[in-house]
Structures are given as structure tokens and as C-alpha cells.
Image: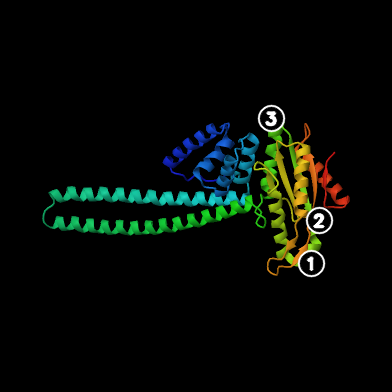
Amino acid sequence: MEEFTDSPEFALATARRASEAMASHGVVPHPRNYALWYAYCAATLPPLNRAVDAAIAAGQPFTEALCASLHARFVADTDPGIEAASESVRQSVLRAMEYVGSAHRAASDYGRTIEAVSDRLETAEGEEVALVLTQAAAETRRFVDVNRSLERNLAASEREIAQLREHLEALRRAGRADPVTGLASRRVFDIALKEHVVLAAHDRLPLAVIVMDVDDFAQFRAAHGQVMADQVLRLIGRSILENVKGQDTVSRHGDQSFAAILPDTGLARAEATAEAIRAALAARSVVNRRTGATLGQVTLSLGIAELHTGETHADLMRRAAEALHAAKVGGANRAVCAS
């Protein structure tokens, strides 16, 4: 889990803003929603702030489904690499705190020594004065040496913490987003879908998923290379995002596959969304940006399924995958609904 490093003053102010924001938008203040809105009010995750601000600007209600999706996409951290990096940061912070504690103890010891020297000097005479001053000078040199050592250790610890935080943030970004398309990662999709299935059953609202596969992608990549293949994947990602709602979660699901979670969406609306995605991509031509050459058309096959009563997230995805297979077998570049 993430190490908490905010100051008490910042934490209290942020907590108040988070509570006010949740009340303003009618959000139930349970732990997951509180973590989401605390992160938003702390402004530590710019992509989260952009997504929330966009929803506010669009007048979109912050339902449990939307909050769950935002939390899964931007806040949840369950990757072992992230946990290990967080633990490294925690250990470094503890070491830094030990250095600070040692500095305080050294200062207290030195203060007591100087106080004792001052008391002795009040009654010292002759050679004893010189002896007391010599001892004080030696103690001062020792204190200076200890302080310098602690300062070096503390500076090294601060550099280590800064590097670890950068590494941790890089891991978080890698865990949340696909590096090629910038869409949500498969891990984020899986977390979000499990939560949405539970929420849909609890709220008795519809839930649909769309799974998509690029037609003949292996041949395109073999003919035009990986760079152009990645360009096509980014184009597809943009086409999907242009045709879904702000509360929907879109992910790159595999090498040439994508998936979308559509909360509060029945089968008919999900089919219309899938057809809009398919048609938008089919209407475009792939162009080599470097040469300006047109490389032709890339199409998608899509499978759509709506959650049935009592289904698990795995059941829902299995039926969507079966519908996708039917689309492929039926000639590709088409959208098929699960029966």
C-alpha cells in the first residue's frame, strides 16, 4: 500500500475539502470514495483531476459506478512492484526520521554538556578553568563532527527518497496505463469490472461490456512494421474513446484486443456504441505520417454482452468473447451481441 507522507496540516485541510466535495456531488463517503476524493483534492494525480473535472464540466452525476471506475483507473494500487517500491520509500523515511532523532539527541546532549560547563566555570579557579574550557572545546568539536555526519546521512537519505518516489510513480503510471495507447491497463480493467458487477447487482442497474479485436492485425504488422502497428493501436484507442461516455472504462486488453465497461448501459445502447466504434474506424484510412503514404483500412470485430442476474464478471466476459468469436467467424468488421 502507498505510504502516507502528507503533513498533518495539509492532510486536515485536504480531508475537509474532500468531505465538502463529496457532499456537494452527493457521493457516499465510504472508504473507497474517500480515497478517491482525497486524491482529487490533494491534486497528486493529474490524470484523475482531469477526468473528474471533465465529468463535472459535463454535469455528469458521480454515481457509485463512476466513482468505482475512477478509483480503479487512477487510485487503486495492487501491483507487487508498487507495493515493494512503497515499502522501500517507507524504510527510507524511517531511516531519515532516525537521523533526525539522532540529531535532536546530539543537540540535547551538547546542550546539557555546555550547561554543565557553565556551572563549573562559575566556581572554577586557576588551572581548572583551562581544563573545563578544553573539555568544552573537545565536546564542541565532537558535536560538530556528529552533526556533519548526520547532515551527510540525511542528505543521502533525502536523495534516495526522491529517487524512490520517482520510481514508485513510474510504476504506478505503468500499472494504470498501457504504454502504447495510454488506455487503462488490463489490471485496471479487471479491478473495475469486478467492482461494476457488484455495484450493478446491488443497484439493479444494467451493465454491458464490449470486447474488440483488430482484424488481420498480424498481417498488417508483418507488412508495415511495429512502429506503424503501434500507430494503428493508438488510432483505435482514440476511436474507441471518442464513442464512449466519461464513466466508461476502456482498456487495451491484449496485443491486438481492447475492451470497454459500460455502466448503466443496456444491451441495445451497448450495441449502438459498438457499432459507432466499428463504423468510425472503418471510415478511416491508415496513413504513414513519415511518408504520407496511405496504407489502407484497419477494422475491428466486436462482441457485446449485458450482465445477467447472478452472473460473475468471468461469465460476462466469456459471453462477450463468444460473441466476438461469432463476429470473426461471420466475416469480421462487424459487431455481434451475445444471446
Where residue 223 is drawn, which disc sits there? 1
Q: Quick one: label 3 or label 1, which is nearer the N terminus?
A: 3
Name the foreground residue: 194 vs 115: 194
Are the residues tagged 1 and 2 within 8 Å (C-beta)? no
Under tag 3, what secondary structure?
A: helix
How crowded is the residue under tag 2: few (<14 C-alpha within 10 Å), some, or many (20+)?
some
Which residue is identified by label 3?
203
Q: Quick one: label 1 or label 2, which is nearer the N terminus?
A: 2
Under tag 1, what secondary structure?
A: helix
Q: Amino acid at mark 1?
A: Ala
In the rendered image, residue 9, in percent from the top left (x then y), is placed at: 42, 40
Please tell me in which quadrant of the rendered image residue 76 appears. Answer: top right
Is residue 3 found left or right of 123 in the rendered image? right
Name the foreground residue: 164 vs 150: 164
Judged from this view, the residue extending furthest toward the bottom is 291
Q: Residue at x 68, y 49 (%)?
A: 241
Where residue 215 is drawn, which disc sits there? 2
Query: Marks 3 and 2, Cα distance to the nearest angstrom?
Result: 37 Å
Query: Does residue 211 show up?
Result: yes
* Quadrant holding the C terminus: top right
Q: Amino acid at mark 3?
A: Asp
